[in-house]
Image (cartoon, rainbow, N blue to C red):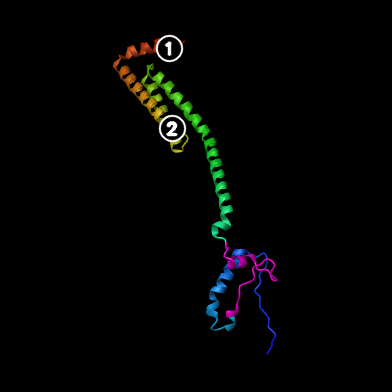
Amino acid sequence: MKTISFSHHIVARKGLSDSTVAAFTRQLFAIRQSLKNDFPLAAKIETPDTDKDATIPAHPGAAAFVDGEEKTFLDRYSDYIWWSLMAFSAMGSAGAWFAGYLKQDERNTNTSQRDRLLEMLKGARQSDSTEELDQMQAEADDILRHTLDSFEHGAIEEGTLTAFNIALEQFHNAVADRKALLLSMPQNLQRTATQFRAAGTA
């Protein structure tokens, strides 16, 4: 007996993502066999015609599943990943340059303080006053504190810190030697040397 038959088509909007349609198609055909017991007609579910000239064109996501051309995660997002890595790299370079620019003032300050330490080294060897030497020592302690802070912040390198330590050690030795010399001199001789140096300066 001839009868009229009709087909049911599962359709999707063209704008629906390929990955969503491909996942739905995969799950549909995965459960088709288990649906046969309750819905015998489920065995008649067929894959769509993926030809380009098909009467009802298949959604690209469903066609990719049927033809075995589904894109992997890397295939879908490789361009985004690559551009993201490039963006992060550029941001890192820009951040490093900006951090270096901000630390430039700190490096300049450290250089001037190191020059000041060298001046105090020369002055300590010619000083005639233990009070003046104590003031120099206190200033050197402040310079040391600032230099260590600069090193912790990355404003100066380890080589610069090593050179500073050498200059600081020489300064401490000069102060200790000068103090020992002044303490060994009679009080009136120290006073005469101070007056003589003041007169020479005038």
Q: Looking at the picture, does residue 39 appear above or below residue 17?
A: below
- Residue 142 makes an appearance in the image: no
Asked if residue 186 lies left or right of residue 41, the reply is: left
The outermost residue toward the front is: 1
Residue drawn at the location 55% of the way across and 48% of the way down: 85
Q: Which mark is residue 64?
A: none
Camera-nearest label, 1 or 2? 2
Residue underneath mark 2: 147
* SS at badge 1: helix
Quadrant for the N terminus in the image: bottom right
Which quadrant of the figure has residue 4? bottom right
Asked if residue 147 lies left or right of residue 19, the reply is: left
In this rendered view, identify the residue nearer to me: 92 or 129: 92
Residue underneath mark 1: 198
**Cα–Cα span, label 1 and label 2:** 33 Å
Place of residue 183 in the rendered image (x, y in percent of width and height, measured from the top left): 30, 18
Magenta stretch secondary structure, dominant: loop
Q: Looking at the picture, does residue 170 appear above or below residue 148?
A: above
- Residue 47 makes an appearance in the image: yes
Question: Does the segment drawn in magenta span residue 57?
Answer: yes
Place of residue 162 in the rendered image (x, y in percent of width and height, measured from the top left): 39, 30
Q: Amino acid at mark 2?
A: Thr
Q: Amino acid at mark 1?
A: Ala
The outermost residue toward the bottom is: 1
In this rendered view, identify the residue nearer to me: 187 or 184: 184
Place of residue 155 in the rendered image (x, y in percent of width and height, measured from the top left): 47, 35
Which quadrant of the figure has residue 56? bottom right
In this rendered view, identify the residue nearer to me: 48 or 25: 48
Q: Looking at the picture, does residue 22 appear above or below residue 143?
A: below
Span highlighted in magenta in the image:
43-70
* SS at badge 2: helix
